[in-house]
Image: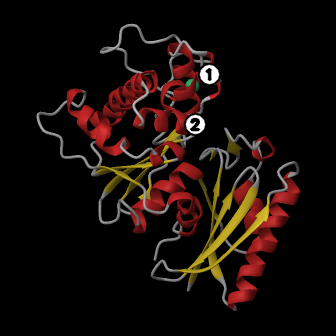
Amino acid sequence: MIRIGVDLGGTKIEAIALDAAGRERLRRRVPSPSDRYEAIVDAIRSLVAEVEATLGERGTVGIGTPGAMSPATGLIKNANSTVLNGRPFAADMAAALGREVRVENDANCFALSEASDGAGAGRRLVLGVILGTGVGGGIVHDGRVWVGPNAIAGEWGHNEMPSRTEPGLPDTRCYCGRRRCIETFVSGPGLAADHRRDAPSGASATLDAAAIATLARAGDPDAVATMARFYERLAAALATVINVLDPDVVVLGGGLSNIEPICDEVLARLPAHVFSDTLATPVVRNRHGDSSGVRGAAWLWPA
Ligand SMILES: [Zn+2]
């Protein structure tokens, strides 16, 4: 039996086939026809057909998408690939592929991949955290994605950044209409914007998060200060999730998770914010990197 996972991104559609033990059998990638919904459905249909023809086997199909499927209506919402919004994507894919298809938010797929055979393997409650262009996350309990009645479980990025230890927190605005969202501070663009606000020189205006982290490692004082604020805010914000969920592990993903000292820096700062005299929560980097989304989509069908 094979599991086929499909990751629907803004620029590409990737498919993977895993065997029963989770080993990769095959991987295919095509450009995403992101402008037309019907073309997306058809591109996925032919990608799955190609994988199955190549392997000579039929598989289960799980798909990771931007946005979320509303449990109430079955329609996609909140997707940045806006042609998906308001569409019965799972039903349309089931009709196209002639079988039931599971569809899940890409952050949830990330968490499921890491919980199944990644950095969170063997842990009962896994919090997967995405720190990238946006800030999101997913929760996996006993190997299953925890979705919730609003399909927002794990979406901590649009809570308000705690300001108890930072009364002068900048009054940022988020695209969602709220102010001081966590995402506006600990996403890649949020980190870069914070550096621009605080570092006086014009040269800093074009630096992205990775460049600022590199400068900090080299001892640049403005970059060191920016990264210290970033780690402190990330720890304060994560603590609000840990206080509610008390996960067995926190797995970091997204581009900012590649910043070398991020896990140690956050772990060093968490105890000051978590409501516990000791902190037994591991904070670890993901194992599967860019493949977590497509692998997690495959794992949407458990054994
Ligand atoms: Zn927001």
Place of residue 232 in the rendered image (x, y in percent of width and height, measured from the top left):
34, 27
Place of residue 173 in the rendered image (x, y in percent of width and height, measured from the top left):
59, 16
Q: Determine which of the numbered discs, if any, sits on residue 19 in the image.
A: none
Q: Which residue sits furthest left?
A: 277
Say if 80 sits above or below 203 in the image. below
Secondary element under disc 1, as helix, strand or loop, is helix
Secondary element under disc 2, as helix, strand or loop, is loop
- Mark 2 Cβ inside 8 Å of ligand 1: no
Dot in front, 2 or 1: 1
Quarter of the render that holds ligand 1: top right
Q: Residue at x 30, y 15 (%)?
A: 165
Q: Residue at x 58, y 23 (%)?
A: 204
Place of residue 30 in the rendered image (x, y in percent of width and height, measured from the top left):
78, 66
Q: Tag 2: Cα neighbours inside 10 Å, few (<14), some, or many (≥20)?
A: some
Q: CA distance from mark 2 to mark 1?
A: 25 Å
Place of residue 176 in the rendered image (x, y in percent of width and height, measured from the top left):
63, 24
Q: Residue at x 43, y 32 (%)?
A: 216
The mark nearer the N terminus, 2 or 1, is 2
Question: Camera-side residue: 112 or 141?
Answer: 112
Question: Camera-side residue: 217 or 34?
Answer: 217
Q: Which residue is mark 2?
A: 134
Q: Residue at x 75, y 87 (%)?
A: 53
Q: Which residue is mark 1?
A: 203
